Image (cartoon, helix red, strand yellow):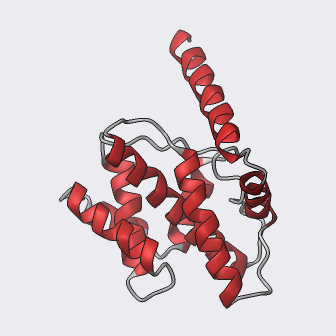
Amino acid sequence: MNHRMVCALVAALGVATTALVAASAKPVTKKEVLTAIEVLEKDPFGDRAATAARVVARFGEESEEVFLYLSDDTLPWMSDDVPPAQAEARALLMAVYFAGNIKAQLERKRVEDDPYSGWLLAIKTYREMRKRQAQIRIPEIEELMELERAGRLKAHAETIQQKQEEQSRRERMI
């Protein structure tokens, strides 16, 4: 997943680049991000969700307390080749993925990407989304749901984390 695509997806959440730059003068606090995560957990479709998503995205980008590894493996549903309505839904799922991942890291007090926790919140949100919009289908999330049903989602996350670690080691060697 390239950086330009991630930026476009964050913009789909209503996060303008200028707003991020202007707001970055004062870092997001742990308390603020936990409040924003709570908003996304309780009502990801509510009026406060877009603002909460911006807070979570900024914290994930700026904070040394968390690490988010963004790739096609961790965010398989992110694509720049989808209709606008799908792009918005996929961007929301990205925001809640960040929220679940960040919350798990803060709770454990370990700076270590946690795709499993991010996926669990994305799956929960997708189920709610489908109740509201039955016509929406995101096959990549449904594949994660199938892994969860089969009891293999956590093992899948661990495999991806091992792959990330190997890639990081190779990059340090260069």
Q: Position of residue 28 (x, y in %)?
A: 24, 59
Q: Position of residue 105 (x, y in %)?
A: 39, 44
Q: Is 82 situated above or below 104?
A: below
Most distant residue in the left direction: 26
Q: Residue 129, located in which quarter of the rendered image?
A: bottom right
Q: Residue 125, located in which quarter of the rendered image?
A: bottom right
Query: Does residue 61 appear to the left or right of 124 in the view shown?
Result: left
Query: Does residue 20 appear to the left or right of 77 in the view shown?
Result: left
- Which image quarter holds the C terminus? top right
Q: Is 72 situated above or below 36?
A: above
Q: Is 93 situated above or below 25?
A: below
> Which residue: 56% across, 71% down?
92
| Residue 8 at least partly seen | no
Q: Nearer the viewer, residue 31 or 167?
A: 31
Most distant residue in the top direction: 173
> Which residue: 67% across, 75% down?
127
Q: How many marks?
A: 0
Query: Does residue 32 appear to the left or right of 128 in the view shown?
Result: left
> Which residue: 53% across, 41% down?
69
| Residue 123 at least partly seen | yes
